[in-house]
Image (spheres, helix red, strand yellow):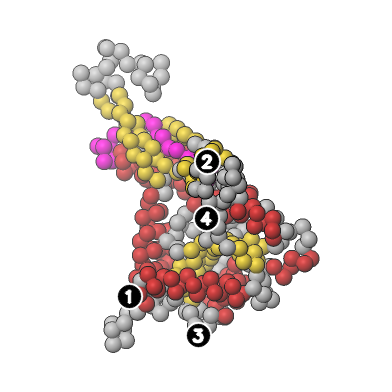
């Protein structure tokens, strides 16, 4: 006799026994997160802000890339940064030292950002006059891939000090990438076991057409292509939403 | 280990659906998970009993349907089952393929208890 299939129900006890009825649902398990992500994306669109979600292993150079990026774009595109960090605000402080709005999202022991955490942080961040919002996700190649934050672009960093087969090991993450950045490329000459061609082959095996850019934020190598990719993304967003280019025109500056 | 977050999101969803059906007790929750969803079925199965405590699904069983990764090649039309990190067309080697399945992360159905009136 069991409690699940109804085999214990006899004519004598039928009126008291609980029967079951099936309810079809067919809804994504992360529907709640996805709704909030759509809300975030609409908020970015209204402000004409291109939102870029940066994901990678810990220590692959996300923060250094952002420091170099906000410096290179100074006077051209205004940047703001949200930093997901388990325990410290070290990265947010490094970026804020460059004079751009940088907010830390403390995730506690959570291994990823979700759309609700980003939404809460947006209440503390004025997007007026901002062109690019970088969301530096928690360093982790597994969990962040599953959660839409409302970003327009996903960038995944793969540093030359990691294995060149990372895209094959973390297909969910690398499939989600709109751009893969091969970081710390200045070390490639001394790291003869990392083959960029092999990394690219692993990426193409995922049927990904995402461009792969090699750069070194520390040495300034390859930064031009990365900056052009950001400029193109921002220009495309403004073309799609021309009104958003001047979100507060006539209100704050009339 | 984001499966606990996924389990909690699942149970909030289950709670809403059960609430819409008169707050019946949930007997069984069926989900469908593909290898490219980023969720590990075994870890979700472990997280579920922790997350279900105190919810409408407190006594519910979790059934996980797993599905394979399937692709269709847009160049040659070939369809095949494949590994999560080999999404090229196995027939022509092309990379212009579309996923037919394998990234599912779905709440498929619930089984709710109801009194049988005779």
What distance separates the C-alpha of mark 3 from that of mark 1?
22 Å
Residue A51, image x and y in percent? 46, 67
| SS assignment at label 4 | loop
Q: Are marks 4 and 3 on the same chain?
A: yes
Q: Residue at x 52, y 61 (%)?
A: A178
Density class for disc 4 (Cα within 10 Å; few <14, some 14-19, many ≥20) is: some
Alpha carbon distance from label 1 to label 2: 44 Å
Front residue of A4 and B76: B76
Upstream in sequence: badge 3 or badge 1: 3
Q: Residue A243 carries which label?
A: 1
Report the front residue among A218 and A168: A168
Badge 3 element: loop
Q: Which of marks 1 and 2 is in front?
A: 2
Q: Residue B78 carries which label?
A: 2
- Kindly indicate whether the residues beneath marks 1 and 2 are on one polypeptide chain: no
Q: Do the residues labelled 1 and 2 touch (CB within 8 Å)?
A: no
Label 1: state its secondary structure: helix
The residue identified by callout 3 is A75
Pointers 4 and 1 within a single chain: yes
Residue denoted by label 4: A176
């Amino acid at each position: 006799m069991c409690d699940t299939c109804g085999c214990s129900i006899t004519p004598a006890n039928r009126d008291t026994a609980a029967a079951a009825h099936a309810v079809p649902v067919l809804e994504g398990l992360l529907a709640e997160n996805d709704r909030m992500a759509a809300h975030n994306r609409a908020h970015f669109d209204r402000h004409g802000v291109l939102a870029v979600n940066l994901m990678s292993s810990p220590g692959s150079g996300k923060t250094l890339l952002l420091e170099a990026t906000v410096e290179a774009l100074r006077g051209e595109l205004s940047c703001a940064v949200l930093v997901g960090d388990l325990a410290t605000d070290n990265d947010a402080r490094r970026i804020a030292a460059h004079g751009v709005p940088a907010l830390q999202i403390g995730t506690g022991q959570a291994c990823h950002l979700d759309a609700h955490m980003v939404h809460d942080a947006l209440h503390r961040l004025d997007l007026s006059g901002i062109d690019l919002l970088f969301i530096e996700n928690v360093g982790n190649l597994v969990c962040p891939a599953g959660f839409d934050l409302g970003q327009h672009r996903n960038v995944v960093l793969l540093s030359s000090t990691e294995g060149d087969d990372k895209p094959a090991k973390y297909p969910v993450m690398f499939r989600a990438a709109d751009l893969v950045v091969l970081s710390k490329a200045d070390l490639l000459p001394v790291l003869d076991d990392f083959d960029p061609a092999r990394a690219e082959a692993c990426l193409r095996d995922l049927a990904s057409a995402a461009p792969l850019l090699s750069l070194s934020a520390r040495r300034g190598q390859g930064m031009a292509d990365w900056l052009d990719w950001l400029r193109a993304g921002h220009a495309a967003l403004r073309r799609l939403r021309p009104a958003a280019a001047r979100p507060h025109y006539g209100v704050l500056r009339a | 280990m984001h499966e606990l977050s996924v389990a909690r999101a699942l149970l909030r969803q289950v709670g809403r659906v059960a609430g819409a059906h008169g707050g019946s007790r949930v007997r069984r929750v069926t989900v469908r998970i593909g290898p490219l969803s980023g969720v590990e079925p075994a870890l979700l199965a472990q997280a579920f009993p922790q997350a279900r405590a105190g919810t409408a699904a407190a006594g519910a069983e979790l059934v996980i349907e797993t599905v394979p990764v399937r692709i269709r090649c847009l160049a040659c039309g070939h369809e095949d089952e494949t590994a999560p990190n080999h999404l090229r067309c196995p027939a022509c080697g092309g990379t212009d393929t579309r996923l037919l399945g394998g990234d599912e992360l779905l709440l498929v159905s619930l089984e709710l208890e109801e009194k049988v009136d005779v």
